[in-house]
Image (tube, rainbow, N blue to C red):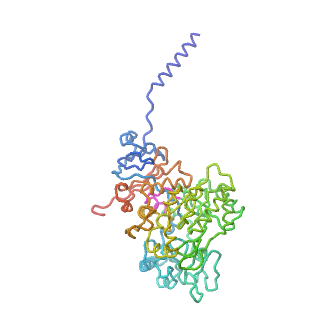
Amino acid sequence: MERLTVRLGLALAALAVAGCAPAAPPDPADLIVVNARVFTPDSSPADAVAIRGNRIALVGGRKEVEALAGKATWRMDAGGASLTPGFNDAHVHFLEGSLSLGQVDLLDAETLPAIETKIRGFAAANPAAPWVLGRGWLYGAFPGGLPTRAQLDLLVPDRPAVMNCYDGHTRWLNSKALAAAGITRHTRDPANGVIVRDASGEPTGVLKEAAQALVDHAIPEPTREARLAALRAGIAEAQRFGVTSVLDAGVGAEELDLFDALRTAGQLGVRMSIALQAHPGMAEAEADQLDSLKARHPGLTIGAVKFYADGVIEAHTASMLNPWTNAPGTGLPNYRPDDLTRIVTMLDRRGWQILIHAIGDRGIRMSLDAIEAAQKANPAPARGRRHRLEHIEDVSADDIARFGKLGVIASMQPFHASPNGNVLNVWAVNVGPERAARAWSWKSIYDAGGKLAFGTDWPVVGIDPRPGMHTALTRTTAAGAPPGGFGPAQRLPLRQVLETFTSGSAYAEFADSTKGLIKVGMLADLVIWDRDLFAVPVDLVKDASVVTTVFDGKVVYRREPRAPGSR
């Protein structure tokens, strides 16, 4: 009994000593950022953040954060500028955007002379290129809204040339490209596509929607190594603008192999969620193929399937409830409503997230109807549903509240609404004033209970989020036109714009528990700006620059210091 008592006393004494011993100090942070205007999710004040590994370890005051600094900790001073989460672009086409970095860039050429100068200059600078390829032209730059092969022949007379429209739904070919593709007056329009012809029946050099593919077989394919090199350049481009995550909207097997190769090599420097592709008439066997494709790439985040319900308003291929104001017909839907509903229901039953490109009011309604039918037909998956419509350029007033009611995310690209000549002189003219009044109604959808996710649609526009931020904040061009803004009731405050580009987009891909917020335990994807975004007028936010991008806890981009006296 005495031995038991002694042993028990020794054990209790040991426990008491252990309980009184000071706790081991936490591991030091790998990186701390101080003197920042931290964009916290609840607006609570904070001026410093600590990162350990690839996670945020502490958000708070400078003194408590610096207490986590060790000998090897990297200290960064934000100089009073904003510290935001990394941008999560909710809709890109990453390989296409990456390849476009080596082509004629027409995105900022808003007039025909500017387009001509860029194409002519690129062709002269690349005399050995067998084809001259580019993208980004605007419908509004051309009389009548469309270019001709004769115009491109003058710029590139010696070899084939193909210029993709900014929206990716129309191609402009010169005569040599038409000949290489074998497109003549006798070539039939494909299903869901249009070869634009002149009064005599000759192709004008413009291919719409599915007809664009008629030239694909003739264009030289870049090698695998060229594609990988382009993707590396695209990743660097994203990091330069503070983009740390993307949703790639519509990917095939070859792209998955490329992304997996970069991931395996440790070179996939953005978080990538991936949507595969659906098509009209899709059957269960083809859905099995999607499941198999996903299973072959367990290291990639693949959970969504992308549909194209319709085309675009500028080319009269979006699907509308009522006729165009300046052309016959109501657009070019890609699906019959019953077929879209059948396929959406089939994939929803299999647990896929649904993304539907829907631009015209009829395309939007048809897509909402299909999702609603799937929800009624199938039990909800354990993780819930976060189906999405993409673009939503001209929604009917009757359908605005359905986004919130059905839990459908409005994935929109605000820079598409920038009121340049293309939007005001082509887009708005095609739909007329009554429908133009509902152009890109993101605030109306939000106010009615819908969730928003913002992106760029790169390479339709650049991957830089700042132009889209400016449009969402002001509804004007960078020059401030038109006075009062285009649809100014749809303006959003800066906090909401930032949230929609970060945590909103993370929610839209089921990743809101791990990224999109500056919060302890979240992934350390951060952006240090060159100023306090909240301390400048909203029309000057576009002039802010990214100084540093942190991805997965590591600094992946730092702006080079400017030379003395430079601006």
Q: Position of residue 507 (x, y in %)?
A: 54, 53
Residue 73, position as x, y percentages in the image? 40, 44
Is residue 53 or residue 97 the one in the foreground?
97
**Residue 67, relative to residue 509: is it above or below?**
above
| Position above or below: 159 against 442 | below
Residue 332, position as x, y percentages in the image: 61, 74
Instruction: Using residue 342 as the reference point, say whether residue 445 is left or right of it.
Output: left
Q: Residue at x 61, y 86 (%)?
A: 185
Q: Give the image quarter of residue 496.
A: bottom left
Residue that lies at the very extreme toward the left in this rendered image:
565
| Residue 513 on image: x %, y % | 53, 48
Query: Does residue 319 appear in the picture of this structure?
Result: no
Query: Residue extending furthest top?
Result: 2
The residue shown at (42%, 80%) is 113
The quarter of the image holding the N terminus is: top right
Q: In the rendered image, which quarter contains the C terminus?
A: bottom left
Magenta stretch bounds: 234-246
How many callouts does the rendering have?
Answer: 0
